[in-house]
Amino acid sequence: MVQADGLKINSTFEGGIDAWAITPHRPDPPPPGTRLINGTAFEDHNSLALPDADTKWNYRSLSPWMRLSSNVRLSPNFEVNLKVRADQLMGAHVDVANIDWGPSPYLGLRAGVVNFNTNWCRTYDVDSPWLAEPDVFCRRKDFTNINNAAPGLQAYTNTTWGDYQLQTIVGVYRPKLFSYETREFGFNSESLGPDFKIGYNRKISAAANFLYLKTGSQLRLGMMRTQESGAYNPRPVQEGRARLNLVDNYYLGIDAYLRPTLRLRYSASKFASRDFYDDLLVVHDKDSSQTWELIYEWRSADLLALGWSKFSVAAAVDDVRLNYRADDYYYLSNSAWMTSWRHQWGKGLYSTLQWTHASQTNGYEGRRRPGSGDAVGLRLGYQY
């Protein structure tokens, strides 16, 4: 923390190197610009959601990373927030860049790049025990883009009753503003061709967080609605029709201290996605995710963690124009177990060792293809 000329600057920097050993190896992807063929080994491997499955930068088993979190308080009721990362999952990415005005202790406004508050990713937590978090929406790029952050405006409240605090927040967002996110189209981003142009992407959200001040235990509820439109230009084939995508997201998160040294975290997300092709409802997609974590402070310098996650997709298609219907068009069930050990070596140095076992079953039109994989990762990090 630095104080000068009335400014209060509080910044945290983290950086390090991650090393992963993953089996089986990821198959070679199809050539750029081509769509995945249903049933490929590459698609099966991506469904495992291991660290090599979906990265912004080309995956490397040994990769550097960094995090920067900064808060500048300009006056008692005005501050600037910044959170920036660089890693192979998201590339160089701004997660927060906003101004925060609090005219009273009970009410405030934020404008800029703001977090939706409909997930509970631990990207910037200085005590996170994970290299890759259990929640699939925090460890897959295409999923993180859906419910992470975007340019927008938020209003929030803080109310305290004795040992309890209620925080509420509502927001409106425009991800395409300033070219912040130009390719996110719900759960269909990876399946769209290169000539697909997104016309608009609009989101609204509301969230409430209940905090027990004595222990720090929390309960979070959130919802978000997304409306997106787009079309192919030029239009390549009959299937390349104008599209409207509606996504409703509901979130529940619990963070409870069972004992002073034992912490339980649980999160659940549900998505309902509807795709309209030329104003006709064609695809109805239901997705859900659950995550459990147990974190034990073994000693002051050691954290042990056990995690489990399950992610499922069920999509139905009813395309009148093509005379095609499939109630079981696509199915995916992914589950993962993971455990980790984090050790503080002193003077800002720490290490994290994590093992993940993932299994999946996916398929189109009633067919099912199983698969499984393992990943062992070691992180050497430094905090300043």
Image (cartoon, rainbow, N blue to C red):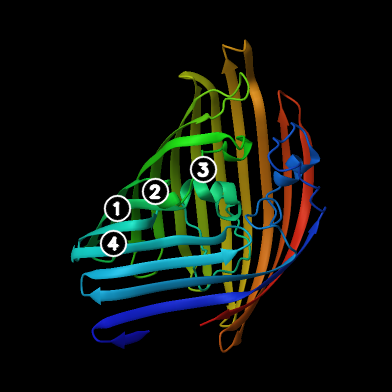
Disc on the earlier residue, 2 or 4 = 4
- Callout 1 environment at 10 Å: few (<14), some (14 to 19), or many (20+)? many
Q: CA distance from mark 4 to mark 1?
A: 19 Å
The residue lying at 51 percent from left, 49 percent from top is 145
The residue carrying mark 2 is: 177
Classify residue 209 as left or right of residue 246.
Answer: left
Q: CA distance from mark 2 to mark 4?
A: 34 Å
Q: Between tags 2 and 4, which lies in front? A: 2
Element marked by disc 4: strand
Q: Check the image and report above or below for 383 versus 186.
A: below
Disc on the earlier residue, 3 or 1 = 1
Q: Between tags 4 and 1, which lies in front? A: 1
Asked whether the viewer can see residue 266, the reply is yes
The residue carrying mark 1 is: 154
331 or 115: nearer the viewer = 115
Q: Are marks 3 and 4 in contact (CB under 8 Å)?
A: no
Identity, as a three-letter code, of the amino acid under mark 4:
Gln
Pinpoint residue 55: horizontal percent, then vertical percent. 65, 54
Disc on the earlier residue, 4 or 1 = 1
The residue carrying mark 4 is: 165
